Structures are given as C-alpha cells and as structure tokens.
Image (tube, rainbow, N blue to C red):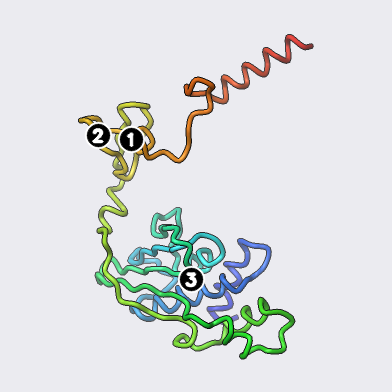
Amino acid sequence: MNPMAQLMEQSAARHSQLCPRQVLGVRMGLLAGRVLGLDVPDVDKRLVTMMETDGCAADGVSAATGCTVGNRRLRILDFGKVAATFVDMKGDQAIRIVPRPGIRVAAQQLAPDRESRWHAQLQAYQVMPDGDLLAVQVVKLNVSLEELLSKPAYRVNCEACGEEIINQREVVMGGRMLCRACAGQSYYRLAGRDGTQLWMDELWRTYQALAERTA
C-alpha cells in the first residue's frame, strides 16, 4: 500500500467510509510537507496546522500531518472553508492551501463513468496533479505562535467562578483575572431558574427525593 493510501485508510477509520473531503485533507497535508520541506506525518513537532473547518477534511489533514487537537498542533478556526494554514515553527514559514475553484467539474470530466458526482470526486481527487487540485499561498500570521500555543503547565484560577484556566486564556477586566465566560464571552448560560448554578449532583438528589415521595 502506498503512503497516500495508508493515510486515507487511517482517516477513513474515523468515519464510516472514505469521502472526497478526507482525500482533499490528506492531499493538502502531503503537499504542505513537500512545500515546507518537512517529513509528514511530522514527528519532530515542527508543524502547526490551522484548519478553517471541522469535519472530514480536518481528519484527512490530521492523518497526513500528525497534527492533532490532542497534541495542540491542530487548531480549528471555523471559517467554513476547506482550507488550512501550515506553519513550520523552526523555519518560520507559513503557507495556506485551498482547493482550486472548479475541481468538482474537473473531477466529473476525469471520471465520467462513476455512478455519481460524489464517486467521481472520490476517485479524481486521488489522482489529480497537485497543481490542478490545490492552490498554495505564502502567508504571515496575524497572531504569534507563542500567543496561540501559550506556555506549558501555565494555569491560573478565575477570580469570579474559581475554575482553573490553562493556556493563558484568562482575561483581565477591572483589575480581576477572569475566565472568558465570566468576562462576558461565554457560549453557554446557567440553567438554574434564577440564573444560579445547577450541578448534576443536585439534580440527582432532587430526582432521588422525588422518587422516594412517589414510591
């Protein structure tokens, strides 16, 4: 099995099957390695990837590069685009790779006998030349990698809720060190009727008391 086929197999293992976007992700990751002069999957922890969408393409990129959310070298910035920026931390180089416009049409022309457009894309994306499939841009980051990755083992506690904050994601507001939620940047709200915290152990005790009364 050739290296690309192995990587596609690894990506497909995370899904019910291999799909065209996984193939695109694998091709993007492999091309990034060639352009930056790095061996991929990267075991030297030189490569950081910023993926502009989640889902299948991200898994393909992760399989090809070795960058994962768990090792903090795959960052998801949800722009809704099948695109990724690859940064060589030692070489101080950054490139952005994106599929070329019109590749769906090109895929149908390359594999006209496949049973559907999806199947045509799945086949064609595996064999199309890099230059026909993908475009590469040289870019500069608007944020430093130091800010993005922060310091290992760094932690503080929010002065409002008391929860621990890692990776230098605290916000200083009014002279207090706060988590982003307490600083007004939360994606959730407390579920208590009066806006107070409602913990699962409290819910469980309430459920048990109700069960005892109705037994």
Residue at figure coordinates x 28%, y 58% from the top left: 145
Between the residue at mark 1 and the residue at mark 3, the CA separation in whole angstroms equals 38 Å
Q: Secondary structure at mark 1?
A: helix
Where residue 56 appears, as percent x and y from the top left, is: 56, 65
Disc 2 residue type (three-letter): Met
Disc 3 residue type (three-letter): Ala
Between the residue at mark 2 and the residue at mark 3, the CA separation in whole angstroms equals 41 Å
**Side of 188 relative to 47 (left or right):** right
Residue at the extreme left = 175
Give the mark, 1 or 3, whose residue is nearer the N terminus.
3
Callout in the foreground (1, 3): 1
Mark 1, other Cα within 10 Å: few <14 / some 14–19 / many ≥20: some
Give the mark, 1 or 2, whose residue is nearer the N terminus.
2
Q: Which residue is mark 1?
A: 183
Disc on res. 173: 2
User: Which one is in front, 18 or 3?
Assistant: 18
Q: Is residue 175 above or below residue 80?
A: above
Residue at figure coordinates x 47%, y 66% from the top left: 81
Q: Secondary structure at mark 2?
A: strand
Residue at figure coordinates x 29%, y 72% from the top left: 139
